[in-house]
Structure formats: structure tokens, C-alpha cells
Image (cartoon, helix red, strand yellow):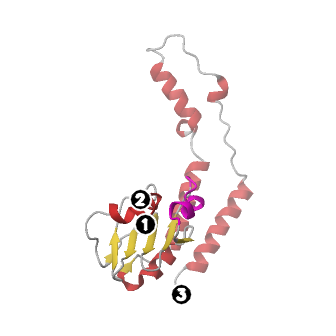
Amino acid sequence: MISVVDSDGRLRFWPLWWHLSKAWHGPALLDKLPGPGISRIRLKKIPEGGAHIDVPNKTIGAWQTADTMGFFEALPDLWSGWRTERWDDRYENHVAACGSAMRVPELDLVGGVDLAESWIAKRVFESYEDSPAGQIATLAGMLAPLAPGMEVGSEALADFAVRPTAAEWARFQQACALLRQSWAPSA
């Protein structure tokens, strides 16, 4: 999500595909934004990242859920002469900078705990067939007729998964239950 306060003080939005921050373009981004943008926006989900550019104050605030490319360290050089604010993953700063013109759904913390616990359980207790080693074994079996004599080393097929003990898993589940309880809406 890109928001811009232009030189006339008008706030506009561009809900762009994020993957890599558009703020990598530096101030040239302002000339690359498609069309006039929109003046108000209601999002159905919280974006993965964003930047709020205040042209009159020469300020940019940027956030994203994962900084795998070193974006935050590069931001001051990319926006040389501008005041840069690193918002890390705090989308709330972006929402606050835009006031009522940008609406995002309320964060569902209980749903997030449910999703995380389910995903972690599936990943930790996956079957051998679903594991990376199991996938290698399946692929090797499929390729065997095409590559006679091909061998896959035993280390590639070993199930090296480290699984929690029953007590460790129970503690994790208890922690999730406590989070749900503390965030559940009161009656």
C-alpha cells in the first residue's frame, strides 16, 4: 500500500502488489505511480507492507512484514535528503498517518493463534511422505525409469525431523490457549 500526501496536501492511495517494496525506487516512485490514485480506501485484509510519503515534509515512513532484502537499512540512501521512518512491521503507523481515509480490518488475534497452532502442528508432525526427505524419495522413484542407475544418498532420505516431546507440545498448546483466553472478547 502506497499513500502519498502531495504538494497540495491531498492524500492519495495506490494499492499495489507488494512482494518487494515499491519504495526501493526512491523519490522517483512519485513519478511512477499509476494514475491519480484514490482518496479513500477500505481494505479487506491487512497488506504485507506499505509506505507513506509526505511530500511537503519530505518524509517517508515504510513498513513490511519481512525485510529479507535489507530494505530498511537501504531506505535512508534510497531517499537521500528525506526524513525516513522505519516502521518495521507496524502497519498501525501507516493507518494512523492516513487517519480515517484508510480502513483496515480489525486484527483477529485469536484467529491468528488458531492458524499458527494448526500450521505448526501440521509442519512438526508431518508424515514422512510429506516431509522433504519423503518428497525426494517420491521424486527419485518417478525419475528412476528416466535415469537408470541414479542413486539418492541415504542422508537425503533420512527423516531428521526434530519433534517436540509430549510435554513440550503440551506447553506450546497451553501457551496458545492462554493467548486465546487473554484476547477473547469479554462477554
Q: Earlier in the sequence, mark 1 or mark 3?
A: 1
Front residue of this view, candidates 118 and 140:
140
Mark 3–mark 2 distance (CA, rounded to whole Å): 36 Å
Q: Residue at x 54, y 62 (%)?
A: 75
Q: Nearer the viewer, mark 2 or mark 1?
A: 2
- How would you classify the magenta stretch by its main secondary structure? helix
Q: Residue at x 44, y 73 (%)?
A: 52
Q: Which residue is mark 1?
A: 47
Answer above or below: position of 43 versus 17.
Answer: below
Front residue of this view, candidates 186 and 147:
147
Q: Nearer the viewer, mark 3 or mark 2?
A: 2
Residue 91 placement, left or right of 37: right
Q: Residue at x 39, y 68 (%)?
A: 2
Q: Which residue is mark 2?
A: 18
Q: Secondary structure at mark 2?
A: loop
Q: Secondary structure at mark 1?
A: loop
Mark 2–mark 1 distance (CA, rounded to whole Å): 8 Å
Segment colored magenta:
68-80
Q: Which residue is mark 3?
A: 186
Answer above or below: position of 152 versus 60.
Answer: above
Mark 1–mark 3 distance (CA, rounded to whole Å): 28 Å
